[in-house]
Image (spheres, helix red, strand yellow):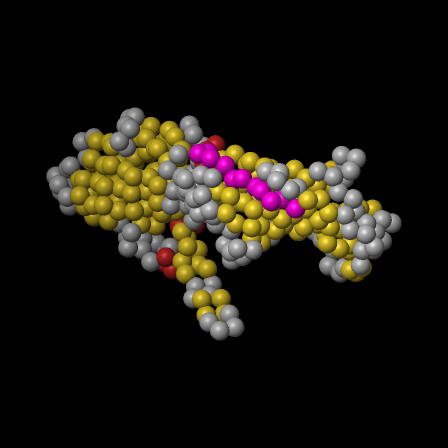
């Protein structure tokens, strides 16, 4: 936690490092982010309670050399002194001058970015000398496509299952699970929604809502859905905890209204590429002619593109 009060003093000497034509490639699936026109300089020195800190500005152009939109990214910046001693590392994006309200970079597009880095330099020094600066991508958020198969009760690349009661096909995507279910029996079939659950990648059970349930009522009990004999229903299933409301923002000349947000339970970006081979589940209890049956479906992530 940074101290709350700072004393800003003018520097007697400022040393800047111009990287010139130096470029740094940060690999991503399907391409890379290329950093160019890199400049690192000391802006000012701050003092607090006898400790001296320096504000360092790292500037560079970031070019998205993939074929997909990168919604946001984070880069660790390691700053070293002339002797090779690590001064500080920073992992958070501060601002991108070309589009400060969003850090997204379209495919083959470039943004000019700036990172302020706070470096402790001791108790007596009032100037900083810089050596090399190293960059490492630590996070990136971009759209991915999951290839998912049904693993249990029976394996199916097309994510279909059939027994004496139901015929069902699933379409799992990062924010929801699509379901198309046909009642094969001669009696009405009920889906008990208050007992349906998505089991996440970490094995945690999550209450769901389905199509037709208002987001504001996501914590309330849900009536069952009745499927007549021989009929089919199509529905969408979402973890209730993935739904949240973002409040409106009042600006000087306008008002941006609030909106509902559905967060993915399967992540985008770099994190997604680490999930190949992992499984998640869907628990669906149904009742037919007064008898209950529980279905425990398991899905496997086969590939991420």
141 relative to 93 in the view: left or right: left
* Residue 239 % position (x, y): 39, 47
Residue extent of the magenta highlight: 29-39
Q: How many numbered discs?
A: 0
Residue 170 lies within the magenta run: no
142 relative to 195 in the view: left or right: right
Q: Residue furthest front?
A: 21
Against 10, residue 240 (above or below) is above
Front residue of this view, candidates 154 and 188: 154
Front residue of this view, candidates 7 and 96: 96
* Residue 303 % position (x, y): 39, 30
* Residue 183 % position (x, y): 17, 40
Instruction: Identify the residue at image location x=78%, y=54%.
Output: 45
286 relative to 15 in the view: left or right: left
Q: Residue furthest right?
A: 124
Q: Quadrant of residue 67?
A: top left
Instruction: Identify the residue at image location x=73%, y=54%.
Output: 43
Instruction: Identify the residue at image location x=33%, y=58%.
Output: 214
* Residue 122 % position (x, y): 83, 46
Q: Main secondary structure of the magenta part?
A: strand
The C terminus: image quadrant: top left
Q: Quadrant of residue 18?
A: top right
Instruction: Identify the residue at image location x=71%, y=38%.
Output: 132
Q: Residue furthest bottom?
A: 253
The answer to whether residue 297 is visible is yes
The answer to whether residue 266 is visible is no
């Amino acid at each position: 936690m940074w101290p709350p009060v700072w004393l800003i003093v003018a520097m007697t000497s400022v040393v800047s490092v111009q990287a010139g034509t130096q470029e740094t490639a940060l690999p991503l699936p399907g391409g890379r982010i290329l950093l160019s026109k890199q400049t690192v300089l000391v802006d000012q020195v701050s003092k607090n309670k006898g400790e001296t800190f320096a504000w360092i500005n790292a500037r560079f152009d970031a070019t998205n050399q993939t074929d997909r939109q990168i919604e946001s990214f984070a880069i660790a910046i390691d700053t070293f002194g002339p002797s090779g001693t690590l001064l500080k590392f920073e992992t958070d994006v501060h601002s991108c001058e070309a589009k400060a309200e969003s850090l997204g970079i379209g495919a083959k597009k470039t943004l000019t970015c700036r990172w302020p880095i706070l470096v402790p330099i001791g108790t007596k020094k009032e100037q900083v000398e810089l050596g090399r600066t190293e960059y490492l991508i630590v996070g990136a958020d971009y759209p991915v496509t999951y290839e998912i198969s049904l693993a249990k009760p029976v394996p199916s690349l097309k994510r279909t299952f059939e027994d004496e009661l139901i015929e069902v096909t699933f379409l799992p995507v990062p924010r929801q699970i699509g379901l198309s279910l046909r009642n094969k029996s001669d009696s009405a079939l009920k889906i008990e929604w208050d007992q349906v659950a998505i089991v996440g990648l970490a094995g945690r059970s999550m209450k769901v809502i389905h199509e037709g349930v208002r987001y504001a009522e996501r914590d309330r009990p849900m009536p069952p859905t009745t499927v007549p004999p021989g009929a089919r229903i199509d529905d969408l299933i979402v973890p209730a905890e993935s739904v949240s409301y973002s409040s409106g923002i009042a600006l000087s000349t306008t008002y941006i209204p609030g909106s509902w947000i559905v967060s993915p339970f399967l992540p985008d970006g770099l994190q997604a590429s680490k999930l190949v081979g992992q499984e998640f589940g869907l628990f669906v209890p149904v009742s037919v002619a007064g008898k209950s049956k529980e279905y425990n479906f398991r899905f496997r992530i086969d590939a991420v593109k």
